[in-house]
Image (cartoon, rainbow, N blue to C red):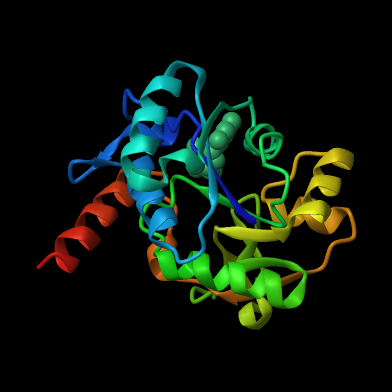
């Protein structure tokens, strides 16, 4: 394959308040990790799929990934994550095969991101040669607050919420990770810090990140509605 998709699933998910690490929590009977991988394998570009999992969950991640992959099982790699998301992505990046020219990085926690979002990001990376992030407009009014007192209203017209999968030309992403000096909150910030240009594509409401118990209920509800 010329595409690799790194699915980071090595977080503990403390804010979800469950015993299992987040990616191994079920939403309507199917783990968050498997739901994310189903979309990756439903996307139209064949990919090397790299799952980054917690040390204690490597075997479980492997069996989930093989089930999601079906006949594409040969294209699956499972590796152990690191102490931060950035370290986990770096661990995944180290296993990308020669010949891959485009890399997507996806949070397993965005379990309902649809296959078409992966396709949209891949197409845009390949047509622009830049970093690509899915974005949605900010709809709430945003305030700046200091010590509980409102200090001002932020102009939201040029603000967006950013999601994953985020996509990059492979060589430039490798370089950005090799020289990264600080922790960044997403791969696009790390890529920009190395001088890379990043553009947006339209995000998808279904790509919300499952972080809190409320998000888990929302995911259950979305699936309930879409199944009738
Ligand atoms: O904690 P948060 O939900 O922001 O994490 C985003 C994604 O990064 C999750 O899918 C999580 O599993 C992953 N992650 C990781 N390794 C870490 C921390 C987070 O793979 N050390």
**Image quadrant in which you'd find residue 132:** bottom right
| Res 55 visible | yes
Q: Quadrant of residue 161?
A: bottom right
Residue at the farthest top position: 56
| Residue at the image point whose x is 47% and y is 39% from the top | 74
* Observer-nearest of 95 and 113: 95
Residue drawn at x 39%, y 50% as measured from the top left: 36
Left or right: residue 92 versus residue 12 is: right
Give the residue furthest to the left.
Answer: 228
Q: Is residue 138 above or below residue 186?
A: below
Coordinates of residue 90 in the picture (x, y in percent): 70, 36
Q: How many marks?
A: 0
Residue 40 vs 69, above or below: the answer is below
Residue 207 % position (x, y) = 43, 61
* Residue drawn at the location 35% of the way across and 52% of the way down: 38
Residue 32, visible in the rendered structure: no
Closer to us: 161 or 63: 63
């Amino acid at each position: 394959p010329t595409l690799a998709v790194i699915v980071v699933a090595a977080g503990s998910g403390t804010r979800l308040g469950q015993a299992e690490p987040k990616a191994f929590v079920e939403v309507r009977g199917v783990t968050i990790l498997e739901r994310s991988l189903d979309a990756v394998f439903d996307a139209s570009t064949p990919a090397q799929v790299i799952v980054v999992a917690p040390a204690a969950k490597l075997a479980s991640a492997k069996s989930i990934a093989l089930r999601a992959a079906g006949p594409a099982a040969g294209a699956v790699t499972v590796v152990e994550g690191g102490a931060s998301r950035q370290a986990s992505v770096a661990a995944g990046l180290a296993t990308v095969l020669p010949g891959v020219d485009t890399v997507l990085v996806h949070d397993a926690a965005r379990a309902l991101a649809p296959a078409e979002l992966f396709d949209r990001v891949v197409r845009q990376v390949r047509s622009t040669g830049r970093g690509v992030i899915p974005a949605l407009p900010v709809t709430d009014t945003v305030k700046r607050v200091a010590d509980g007192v409102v200090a001002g209203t932020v102009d939201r017209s040029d603000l967006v919420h950013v999601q994953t999968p985020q996509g990059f030309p492979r060589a430039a992403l490798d370089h950005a990770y090799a020289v990264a000096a600080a922790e960044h909150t997403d791969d696009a910030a790390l890529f920009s810090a190395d001088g890379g240009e990043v553009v947006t594509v339209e995000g998808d409401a279904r790509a919300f990140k499952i972080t809190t118990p409320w998000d888990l209920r929302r995911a259950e509800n979305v699936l309930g509605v879409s199944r009738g």
